[in-house]
């Protein structure tokens, strides 16, 4: 009977362990662990032996295991509302940089998942991962749906909310843009250009949207716009913005200017207007809020409120570091960052 010939599959290579490093370096496993946890009382000669053995074997320490070990919980979790809005990347980048300066590692987790029907819901699997990881601190970025479900986490670890309003009683601080100042800048700019009829597209989709709606109402009331300023309801999405513009056009209520709740909404407004043959800004001026990277693209050239996202991220990290150091025992507070208006061709 003939036998089949061929090569035998190679056994999978086992990754090196802390025991392998200890064996090659000629030291104990606990000393290797001490070296990689930046422990004290390790001689330079033995530290170099351990690092050389680790490099020789291609060993990397398990950062999660280190974070769970007693006395070494230096991982800060950053829970991001969603991964679609470019403003969150600026906030996360600034927070991560400040935390790195302070010797903290960070992990970034998305808070929302597609519900299968085009909407989003809280990603409870990711929330469970955070509970199991037990990070040393938490920064949430953007409006988190069902924020109250994080109460177990916020009660156990220092938590700072960035670019949102939602909070539990245990939150150290909320750091966000001053919506009242930002919307007032927009309305003042449009009024100075002689605009007499303004619509705000937003108000739905969370507390930030509601806050900006209220700020819009305050700004137009100050300037006695009366019935010539109104809210056309929409959420933070381009699709919601397009539906709002379609209603305005169908009811022959097109204003001279549209103030959108954020930049993504503003892009949706511009797209809908241009699809209907209405030029921007000639037929209708448009402004956004957040001054994301989208705003500066020449084809869009969106007038937008700059909330100073990098400062929001850095201030959020500072608040968290202060709480971890025990330098504050104050209840949840609010830090409002002064915005500026960046005028481009859309308004």
Image (cartoon, helix red, strand yellow):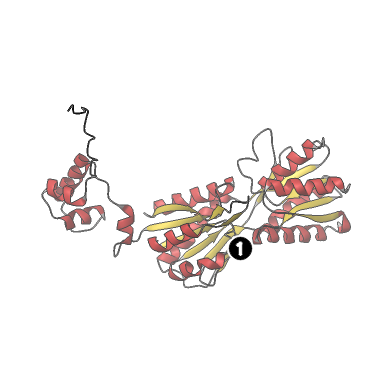
Q: Is residue 280 above or below residue 96?
A: above
Q: Is residue 255 visible?
A: no
What residue do we see at 69% from left, 46% from top?
238
Which of the pair 186/115 is nearer the observer? 115
* Quadrant of the rendered image containing residue 276: top right
Q: In the visual, does 11 lie left or right of 295?
A: left
Which residue position holds label 1? 165
Q: Residue at x 64, y 45 (%)?
A: 291
Considering every residue shown, the one lying at the far front of the view is 1
Report the front residue among 21 and 327: 21
Q: Hey, which quadrant is residue 323 in on the image?
A: bottom left
Q: Disc count in the image?
A: 1
**Front position in the image: 277 or 221:** 277
The part of the image, by quadrant, that contains residue 162 is bottom right
Q: Would residue 265 be found to the left or right of residue 13 on screen? A: right
**Above or below — where is 345 with respect to 217?**
above
In x, y percent, where is residue 133?
38, 60
Q: Is residue 3 visible?
A: yes
Q: Is residue 135 left or right of residue 262?
A: left
Q: In this rendering, is residue 281 above or below 336?
A: above
Mark 1, residues whose alpha carbon is within 10 Å: few (<14), some, or many (≥20)? some
Between 192 and 130, the residue placed more toward the observer is: 130
Quadrant location, the C terminus: top right
The N terminus: image quadrant: top left
Q: Residue at coordinates 82% horizontally, 35% vertically from top-left?
A: 277
Which residue is drawn at the image coordinates 42% and 54% (left, top)?
99
Q: Measuring from the top left, give residue 130's x and y in whole percent.
A: 43, 60
Residue 253 position, x and y percent, is 87, 49
Residue 13 as seen in the image, left or right of residue 110? left
Residue 32 position in % (x across, y down): 19, 53
Does dot 1 land on a helix, a strand or a loop? loop
């Amino acid at each position: 009977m003939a036998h089949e010939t061929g090569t035998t599959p190679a056994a999978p290579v086992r990754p090196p362990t802390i025991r392998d490093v200890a064996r090659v370096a000629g030291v104990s496993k606990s000393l290797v662990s001490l070296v990689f946890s930046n422990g004290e009382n390790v001689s330079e000669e033995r530290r170099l032996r351990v690092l050389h053995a680790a490099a020789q074997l291609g060993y990397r320490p398990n950062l999660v295991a280190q974070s769970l070990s007693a006395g070494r919980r230096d991982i800060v979790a950053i829970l991001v509302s969603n991964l679609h809005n470019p403003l969150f990347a600026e906030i996360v980048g600034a927070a991560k940089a400040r935390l790195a300066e302070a010797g903290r590692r960070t992990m970034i987790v998305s808070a929302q998942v597609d519900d299968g029907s085009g909407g989003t819901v809280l990603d409870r699997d990711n929330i469970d991962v955070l509970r199991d990881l037990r990070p040393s601190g938490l920064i949430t970025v953007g409006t988190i749906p069902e924020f109250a479900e994080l109460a177990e986490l916020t009660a156990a670890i220092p938590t700072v909310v960035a670019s949102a309003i939602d909070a539990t009683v245990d939150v150290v601080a909320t750091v966000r843009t001053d919506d009242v100042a930002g919307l007032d800048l927009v309305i003042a700019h449009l009024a100075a250009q002689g605009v007499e009829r303004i619509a705000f597209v937003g108000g739905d989709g969370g507390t930030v949207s509601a806050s900006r709606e209220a700020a819009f109402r305050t700004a137009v009331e100050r300037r006695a716009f009366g019935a010539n300023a109104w809210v056309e309801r929409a959420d933070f999405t381009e699709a919601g913005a397009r539906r709002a513009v379609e209603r305005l056009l169908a009811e022959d209520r097109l204003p001279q200017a549209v103030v959108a709740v954020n930049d993504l909404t503003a892009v949706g407004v511009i797209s809908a207007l241009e699809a209907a043959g209405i030029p921007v800004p000639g037929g209708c001026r448009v402004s956004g809020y957040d001054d994301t990277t989208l705003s500066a693209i020449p084809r869009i050239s969106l007038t937008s409120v700059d909330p100073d996202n990098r400062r929001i991220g850095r201030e959020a990290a500072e608040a968290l570091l202060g709480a971890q150091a025990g330098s504050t025992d104050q209840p949840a507070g609010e830090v409002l960052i002064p915005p500026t208006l960046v005028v481009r061709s859309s308004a």
